[in-house]
Image (cartoon, rainbow, N blue to C red):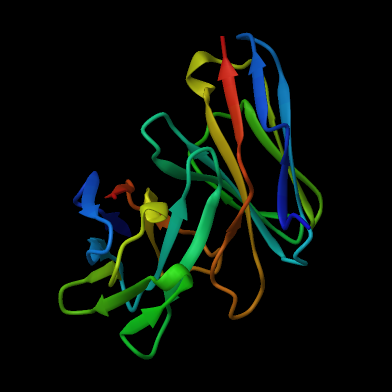
Amino acid sequence: AQSVAQPEDQVNVAEGNPLTVKCTYSVSGNPYLFWYVQYPNRGLQFLLKYITGDNLVKGSYGFEAEFNKSQTSFHLKKPSALVSDSALYFCAVRAPSSNTGKLIFGQGTTLQVKP
Amino acid sequence: DTAVSQTPKYLVTQMGNDKSIKCEQNLGHDTMYWYKQDSKKFLKIMFSYNNKELIINETVPNRFSPKSPDKAHLNLHINSLELGDSAVYFCASRGAGSSYEQYFGPGTRLTVT
């Protein structure tokens, strides 16, 4: 069965410092991986995805993520955090065999960036 | 232009009532989804339609019934509302082919009293 784990409920970082939000997954075959961000009282916004190709993918708002097959991880990173990055971040996985596009989401990680 | 829209944004109702939430997307996507986000922010897929055909039907009480009149609309009807139905419900859509990501609506916060 597919699953996604985000081991940290909350990540705190100072503005200007690099940030990492962790995600590990379990899926049969090569996964499709996604990161979404949810600001308070808003819907989820797509940040980036890994389908195939280069293990380092770049997305919106300066975020990037690195796919590591041996560690089954897809950590979200940003070189320099902004206060406005404070939000709830979700990692999601889809099995490539799925013809429904069904996503399994992690439990979410709250990112708090302090000035 | 709003890509995925939901109405209403807030819905407060009493136990036992029947209510509907509507979703519309103007992205030309073929597939639409309903998710439930509980008080701990956990997201769970409920249903999905592809071109008006039901393709995902997770373990959801049969008081919940989705309806897709056309591929741009996916509505969620809930009968005999219970306290545990209180949550935020999100609609999402996805394009065909190589478009893997889903695009989410703003959510409908349902409160059952």
Is A17 placed left or right of B12 in the picture? left
Q: Residue at x 28, y 72 (%)?
A: A79
Query: Residue B93's spot in the image, x, y percent?
Result: 65, 58
* In the image, residue B61 above or below residue B14: below
Q: Residue furthest left?
A: A71
> Is B106 in front, or is A25?
B106
Is B27 placed left or right of B111 in the picture? right
Q: Residue furthest bottom?
A: A53
Query: Residue A47's spot in the image, x, y percent?
Result: 47, 66
Quarter-of-image position of residue B89:
top right
Q: Residue at x 48, y 71 (%)?
A: A60
Query: Residue B41's spot in the image, x, y percent?
Result: 40, 38
Q: Residue furthest front?
A: A115
* In the image, residue A63 above or below residue A15: below
Q: Residue at x 51, y 14 (%)?
A: B83
In this view of the protein, can residue A96 be seen by the observer?
Answer: no
> Is B103 in front, or is B1?
B1
Query: Residue B17's spot in the image, x, y percent?
Result: 69, 12
In this view of the protein, can residue A74 be seen by the observer?
Answer: yes
Q: Residue at x 63, y 9 (%)?
A: B14
Q: How many marks?
A: 0
Is B53 placed left or right of B107 in the picture? right
Q: Quadrant of the N terminus of chain A?
A: bottom left
Is B10 placed left or right of A76 in the picture? right
